[in-house]
Amino acid sequence: MEDQVRETEDGVPLELGEEVGGRGRIYFDNVVIDNMLDALLELSASVWTNHDRVMVLERILEEKGISVTDEIEKHMPDEAEIARRAEARDAFVDQVFGAFLRRPTHTIGQAVDTTQE
């Protein structure tokens, strides 16, 4: 007799359990790999968006006769700016790595009660 994989009505193997904060996107059979891929995609999108905006900003400033390369290197932020940047960094980390907060509600490989629907 073959072991049959029991799934929720959404197609998630019962062995994975319910995830905290929702299932997230499903790419593979392993939620940890899905979480890593989500983080990579989020990071890639964020990096490209920032890179694109910097290129546009540099171009606009250059057209107005303002060279910012040296000014950026010489810039010394005050305490208020340091605090704002730290807050933005923390939000960025939460956005990129938030996928890792999704976890199965039980140990993978643990016996699952399949009699309850």
Image (cartoon, grey):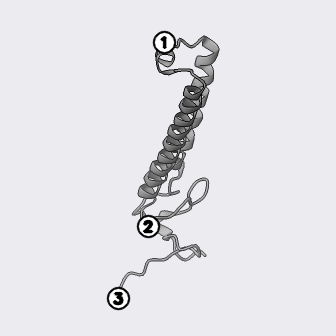
Which residue position holds label 2?
Answer: 111
- Residue 54 as seen in the image, left or right of residue 80: left
Callout 2 secondary element? loop
Q: In what quadrant of the picture does the C terminus appear?
A: bottom right
Q: Against 94, is 78 above or below?
A: above
Residue type marked 3: Met
| Image location of residue 86, percent across then percent down | 57, 24
Q: Earlier in the sequence, mark 1 or mark 2?
A: 1
What percent of the width, then of the height, locates residue 61? 58, 26
Q: What residue would you read off at disc 3?
A: 1
Q: Residues within 10 Å of mark 2 (few under 14, many from 20)?
A: few
Most foreground residue, 59 or 71? 59
Q: Secondary structure at mark 3?
A: loop
Mark 2 to mark 3 CA distance (whole Å):
18 Å
Residue receiving disc 1: 74
The residue at the point 48 percent across, 70 percent down is 13
